[in-house]
């Protein structure tokens, strides 16, 4: 294929659009199959044995050690740094499996999350795209099981654990699965949400699915099974807050009403007694019908119309950015009688019904996989702090996070009509990433099992270092990037969430894996334990906390005097309390040798950190550390970069003789240009500068966007930065590395300046990788 570079590239780009972004590009895609040792992080892994089984206790994950028992002195902390494999990517053949696992090992990955395996149904005899066949659920595709079993075996041999997802996408089929039909021929909602949490037969079938899957994969007491996730992004509390339960009809509505009335009878002895407390005896069914979202908005005043006015007033003040007057503030104690009590009871019913579902499925997993396997229910955001109660018996807590997720004005997941803000995680004034800390249960390991800042966001390289930094400061336990690649054929594509061809996210991945897995970055020394009562959680549920970011912000500020930025000052964890209590502050015992804390500059929007074996910079603006590690942007540049430095000979940075420097900016795909290719540009979406999208794939296309997937060369932004190297020696040589991490050329002597006992390297070549040799 022909690449257009230099003058030709400038001409074609200029002719294409006067709105094209002004970035310099070069073609670069790491050769994942043939990486040289300096960019290969396989050494972090070894085969998983029985002593490496992961258990959860004391708020973290541990390996059980040689005695094979949890909670004993030989237990050893472990952190997970993994990727998601989704859909058909979970079912490679034997050759593909070996290749895939070697690639992941070279990236420093020690776990994969097996996700969306129930999304696609495959005919018997066809190459499997999922676990299931077209027969009644659950009917497993034999070849899919064989391929998945082989993949897990290969992963185990290479030191990579498995996070097994159960229900993710499967959409029940009434005629085939013998579940209740919907009225008027309506289709089952996507992923069966939320009916799969209500219908007894669907729940029983999910239990059978889990039981058979674990048996057929032969995962009983398998040390490579690190964790199991019951249900992806779904809970009854979350569904109710989003209004999804309001749409129930037919048999599903009758089932839901019956469950609610059964709960009421258990709590009050009879509906008659309950309606007297609720003051609803004159209502239809004495108020015993389940509450729709708009009927349950009176947790404070007991009057729905007063509460509607107060909520409307809050929205106005929030938009104006003005503090709320006292009469509009949320009161975090539910009513004790009347309609407010009925709403509080319904919130408790939602939470307890969620808990029953999670507990039942957890029991199945423990029976089939072993008592030590950590299990979680669903992500914390989907239901909010109510998950603190509904998942109280789970073994770890899980969450997802995305910066600048796609918006689809033209319909869900349209590939030709979408937009992004092209925003930065490190310049996010809302603190959305930092607020993940307020969802952690202090008594459980905390995992972010999906995160990304997807292509074509031009700052997407910052997501990995930002997440590693926050997770290290907060001492979290697992990170799973979403995702590696969805299809075996994805090697040909730069696509959306995929890591495998996103050069700017790939080139520093191994260094960041080592930083997180080896505890190289210090955790914050002081912990703030936030005691939250069940009554407060009930009010948060009724206030729509999981779908309204203001509610959690307001609660944490008024109740504990904290904001999102405090997660850069203290480790944060929730604790369920019987009564309102002040914040419990716990200071860690100082170790003799404490790793360095990073500097997270909220004003400039950058992170700077250097310790014994690695250094990191990510974001905007110039930055200098006391160790001599620094980054300075050339005049006229956009001032953004992600830079990592790591020792590759096992010696500390100041003594190392061989180091790897990685630099990255933006990544983009290719656009056809005559007989060749040029970089694909971001443009204002329909002329609106507040939104961005990719240029159309073909001239004259009436659709506003180009595809989020692109074949052809992958392009990286050419940077011009000066990097201060915290090394000591008489001479430094810097080698530009090629796509295999092999030496391509030595950098000119004029690019290296000796200064203040160290060296400054000007990086302005067409490579993201540089081998630093100190003599």
Image (cartoon, rainbow, N blue to C red):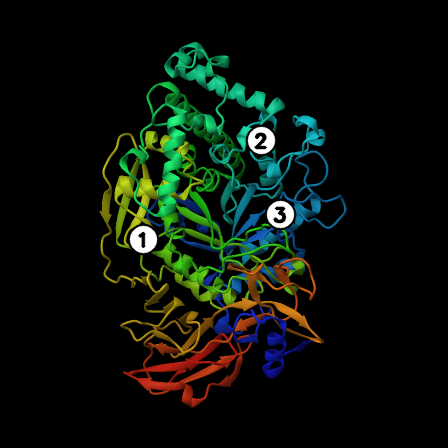
**Foreground residue among 377 and 541:** 541
Q: State whether residue 562 is above or below residue 730.
A: above
| Mark 1, other Cα within 10 Å: few <14 / some 14–19 / many ≥20 | some
Q: Position of residue 635 (x, y in %)?
A: 40, 79
Q: Judging from the image, what secondary structure is the residue with disc 3 in?
A: loop
Q: Quadrant of the C terminus?
A: bottom left
Rendered image quadrant of residue 472: bottom left
Q: Residue furthest right?
A: 125
Rendered image quadrant of residue 348: top left
Q: In this figure, which residue is indicated by the disc labeled 2?
A: 195
Q: In this figure, which residue is indicated by the disc labeled 3?
A: 411
Q: CA distance from mark 3 to mark 2?
A: 24 Å
Residue 565's label in the rendered image is 1
- Tell me if residue 593 can be seen: yes
Which residue appears at 50% of the width and 14% of the height? 284
Q: State whether residue 355 is above or below residue 558.
A: above
Q: Nearer the viewer, mark 3 or mark 1?
A: 3
Residue 478's label in the rendered image is none
Q: Judging from the image, what secondary structure is the residue with disc 2 in?
A: helix
| Mark 2, other Cα within 10 Å: few <14 / some 14–19 / many ≥20 | many
């Amino acid at each position: 294929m022909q690449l257009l570079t230099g003058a030709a590239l400038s001409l074609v780009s200029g002719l294409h659009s006067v709105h094209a972004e002004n970035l310099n590009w070069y073609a670069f895609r790491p050769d994942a199959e043939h990486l040289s040792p300096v960019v290969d992080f396989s050494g972090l892994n070894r085969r998983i044995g029985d002593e490496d089984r992961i258990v959860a206790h004391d708020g973290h994950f541990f390996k059980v050690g040689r005695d094979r028992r949890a909670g004993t002195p030989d237990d050893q902390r472990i952190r997970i740094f993994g990727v998601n494999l989704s859909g058909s990517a979970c079912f490679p053949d034997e050759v593909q499996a070996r290749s895939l696992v070697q690639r992941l090992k070279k990236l420093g990955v020690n776990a994969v999350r097996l996700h969306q395996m129930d999304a696609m149904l495959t005919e018997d005899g066809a190459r499997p795209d999922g676990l299931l066949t077209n027969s009644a659920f659950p009917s497993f595709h034999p070849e899919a099981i064989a391929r998945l079993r082989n993949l897990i075996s290969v992963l185990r041999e290479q030191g990579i654990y498995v996070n097994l997802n159960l229900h993710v996408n499967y959409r029940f089929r009434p005629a085939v699965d013998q579940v209740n039909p919907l009225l008027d021929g309506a289709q089952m909602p996507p992923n069966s949400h939320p009916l799969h949490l209500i219908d007894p037969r669907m729940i029983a079938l999910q239990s059978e699915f889990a039981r058979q899957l674990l048996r057929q994969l032969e995962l009983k007491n398998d040390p490579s099974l690190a964790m199991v996730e019951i249900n992806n992004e779904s809970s009854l509390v979350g569904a109710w807050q989003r209004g999804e339960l309001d749409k129930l009809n037919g048999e599903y509505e009758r089932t839901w009403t019956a469950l609610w009335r059964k709960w009421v009878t258990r709590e009050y002895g009879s509906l008659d007694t309950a309606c007297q407390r609720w003051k609803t005896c004159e209502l239809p069914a004495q108020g015993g019908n389940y509450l729709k979202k708009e009927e349950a908005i009176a947790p404070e005043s007991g009057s729905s119309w007063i509460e509607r006015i107060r909520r409307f007033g809050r929205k106005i003040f929030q938009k104006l950015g003005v503090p709320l007057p006292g009469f509009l503030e949320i009161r975090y104690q539910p009513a004790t009688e009347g309609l407010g009590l009925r709403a509080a009871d319904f919130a408790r019913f939602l939470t307890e019904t969620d808990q029953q579902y999670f507990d039942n499925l957890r029991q199945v997993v423990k029976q089939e996989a072993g008592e030590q396997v950590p299990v979680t229910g669903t992500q914390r955001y989907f239901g909010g702090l109510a998950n603190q109660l509904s998942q109280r018996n789970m073994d770890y807590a899980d969450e997802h996070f995305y910066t600048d997720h796609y918006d689809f004005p033209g319909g869900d997941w349209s590939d030709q009509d979408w937009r992004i803000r092209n925003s930065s995680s490190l310049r996010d004034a809302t603190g959305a990433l930092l607020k993940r800390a307020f969802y952690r249960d202090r008594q459980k390991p905390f995992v972010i099992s999906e995160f990304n800042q997807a292509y074509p966001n031009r700052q997407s390289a910052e997501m990995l270092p930002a997440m590693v930094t926050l997770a290290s400061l907060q001492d979290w336990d697992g990170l799973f990037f979403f995702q590696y690649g969805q299809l075996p054929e994805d090697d040909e594509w730069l696509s959306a969430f995929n890591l495998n061809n996103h050069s700017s996210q790939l080139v520093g991945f191994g260094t960041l894996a080592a930083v997180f897995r080896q505890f190289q970055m210090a955790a914050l020394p002081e912990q703030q334990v936030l005691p939250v009562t069940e009554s407060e959680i009930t009010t948060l549920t009724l206030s729509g906390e999981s779908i309204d970011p203001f509610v959690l912000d307001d609660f944490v500020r008024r109740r504990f005097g904290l904001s999102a930025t405090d997660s850069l000052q203290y480790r944060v964890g929730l604790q369920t309390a019987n009564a309102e209590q002040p914040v419990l502050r716990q200071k860690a015992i100082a170790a003799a040798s404490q790793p360095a804390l990073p500097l997270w500059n909220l004003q400039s929007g950058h992170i700077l950190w250097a310790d014994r074996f690695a250094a990191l910079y990510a974001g905007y603006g110039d930055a200098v550390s006391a160790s001599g590690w620094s980054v300075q942007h050339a005049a006229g540049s956009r001032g953004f970069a992600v830079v990592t430095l790591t020792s590759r000979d096992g010696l500390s940075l100041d003594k190392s003789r061989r180091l790897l420097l990685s630099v990255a900016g933006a990544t983009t795909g290719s656009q056809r240009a005559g007989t060749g290719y040029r970089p694909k540009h971001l443009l204002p979406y329909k002329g609106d500068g507040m939104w961005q999208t990719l240029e159309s794939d073909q001239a004259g296309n009436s659709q506003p966007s180009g595809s989020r997937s692109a074949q052809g060369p992958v392009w990286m932004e050419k940077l011009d930065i000066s990097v201060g190297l915290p090394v000591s020696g008489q001479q430094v040589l810097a080698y530009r590395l090629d796509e295999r991490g092999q030496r391509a050329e030595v950098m000119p002597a004029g690019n290296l300046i000796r200064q203040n006992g160290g060296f400054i390297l000007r990086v302005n070549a067409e490579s993201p990788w540089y081998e630093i040799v100190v003599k």
